[in-house]
Image: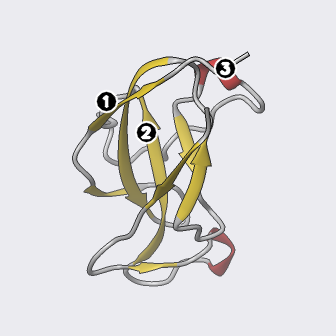
Amino acid sequence: MPFRVAFAVTGMGVAPVAAGDIHDTGHHHILIDMPMPADIKAPIPFDKQNEYQHQHYKHFGNGETETLLDLPAGKHTLRLLFADHNHVPYYISSKEISVVVLDKPH
């Protein structure tokens, strides 16, 4: 079942990727069932398009501050990670949370 996730950042500005390189601004990403990236200079990867069952990186490059997540049933971990216009993390992140997604009613 889809569920709403709202997010914010403190001390930085939110801007769409198209705005380019603006000091202390970036956009949000949600890491789904993934640890923090080990390479601090590598951009956050993109999932394959329309790969519902294996979503790991949700990019919000239009400057979004909320979304509807529709994950497969089961337990998942979520963490926000804030990154620049090139998707390189600032390593400003949320605590990891766990959610349990129930099967959709028939």
Residue designated by label 1: 35
Choose top left, top right, bottom left or bottom right for residue 31: top left
Element at label 1: loop
Residue designated by label 2: 31
Element at label 2: strand
Q: Where does the image place residue 90, in percent across and percent down from the top left?
A: 32, 61
Q: Taking 64 as reference, is 36 above or below it?
A: above
Q: Where does the image place residue 25, in percent across and percent down from the top left?
A: 44, 78
Question: Which of the marked residues, 3 or 2, is nearer the chain's N terminus?
Answer: 2
Q: CA distance from mark 3 to mark 2?
A: 26 Å
- The kind of residue on which mark 2 rests is Leu
Pointer 3 local density, CA inside 10 Å: few below 14, some 14–19, many at least 20: few
Frontmost of labels 3 and 1 is 3
Q: CA distance from mark 3 to mark 1?
A: 31 Å
- The kind of residue on which mark 3 rests is Pro
Q: How is the image coloured?
A: secondary structure
Quadrant location of the C terminus in the rendered image: top right
Instruction: State left or right for residue 75 relative to residue 4.
Output: left
Which residue sits at x=77%, y=30%?
A: 50
Which residue sits at x=55%, y=66%?
A: 85
Choose top left, top right, bottom left or bottom right for residue 19: bottom right
Instruction: State left or right for residue 4 relative to residue 37.
Output: right
Residue designated by label 3: 105
Q: Where does the image place residue 6, in percent across and percent down from the top left?
A: 46, 61
Q: Where does the image place residue 84, in percent across and percent down from the top left?
A: 47, 65
Pointer 2 local density, CA inside 10 Å: few below 14, some 14–19, many at least 20: many
